[in-house]
Image (spheres, rainbow, N blue to C red):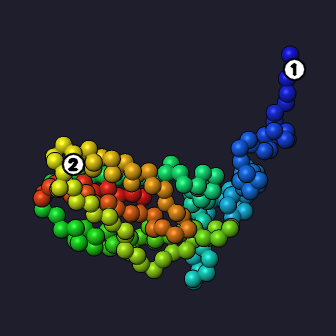
Amino acid sequence: MRTTRNDANSPASAQPAGLSTAKQALLSKWLRGGGANGSNGDTTIPRRQGNGPVPLSAEQQRLWFFNQLESGSPLYNMPIASRIRCALNPQALQEARDTVVARHEALRTRFVGQEPTQTIDVTSSVPQETIDLRHLSAAQRETEAMRLLEVEAKQPFDLTRDLMVRAVLVRLDEQDWIFLVMM
């Protein structure tokens, strides 16, 4: 029986199967402790000075790194759905979300560049799709709402363009709604 050695110095472990050359280089850099911005494991986030480039935090680097390895994956999506059974003003709900996003830079942050930095948008309105299912029968509404919400939950974010939050409001009846927030 023949055995092979597979350790950190082995070419087999240095080039994982199925990864492009660019992704292999990125993985190799990450495994050497370089992170996305060349940090060596220092998790201290420096205070931002002025309007210059802002480095990614360790968690943002991790998110960016895995997004590069599996672009288009919804793995890190966090769907939060709520059933609302009352009279609802969709415009007031939109304004409330926009106020929260205006207060939290993390929700307005995009990752840009080959060696990414944070770009924090001044303010943005949270994209909200409103879907009215009142034209369907009651049984069809529930089924279609669940299907639509599942599809939305699987939509990946584009870290270079999208806000880190989006919403879908599904109207089932006059006072029956499902509200999905994706982060």
Q: What residue appears at the point 22 percent right and 60 percent down from the top-left corner?
A: 132
Q: Is residue 74 left or right of residue 28?
A: left
Q: Which secondary structure lies at badge 2?
A: helix
Q: Position of residue 63 (x, y in %)?
A: 57, 56
Most extreme residue toward the right is: 2
The tag earlier along the polypeptide, 2 or 1, is 1
Which quadrant of the structure image shows residue 111? bottom right
Q: Which secondary structure lies at badge 1?
A: loop
Q: Is residue 41 left or right of residue 92?
A: right
Mark 2 surroundings: few (<14), some (14-19) or many (≥20) residues within 10 A: some
Q: Position of residue 79 (x, y in %)?
A: 38, 52
Of residue 60 and residue 77, the one placed in the foreground of this image is 77
Which quadrant of the structure image shows residue 139? top left
Q: CA distance from mark 2 to mark 1?
A: 61 Å
Nearer to us of marks 2 and 1 is: 2
Q: Label 2 sits on what residue type?
A: Arg
Q: Is residue 143 left or right of residue 30?
A: left
Of residue 162 and residue 107, the one placed in the foreground of this image is 162
Q: Is residue 51 left or right of residue 171?
A: right
Q: What residue appears at the point 39 percent right and 50 percent down from the top-left corner?
A: 151
Q: Position of residue 19 (x, y in %)?
A: 71, 48
Of residue 34 and residue 157, the one placed in the foreground of this image is 157
- Determine whether 101 is above or below 151 in the image: below
Q: Which residue is mark 2?
A: 141
Disc number placed over residue 2 in the picture, else none: 1
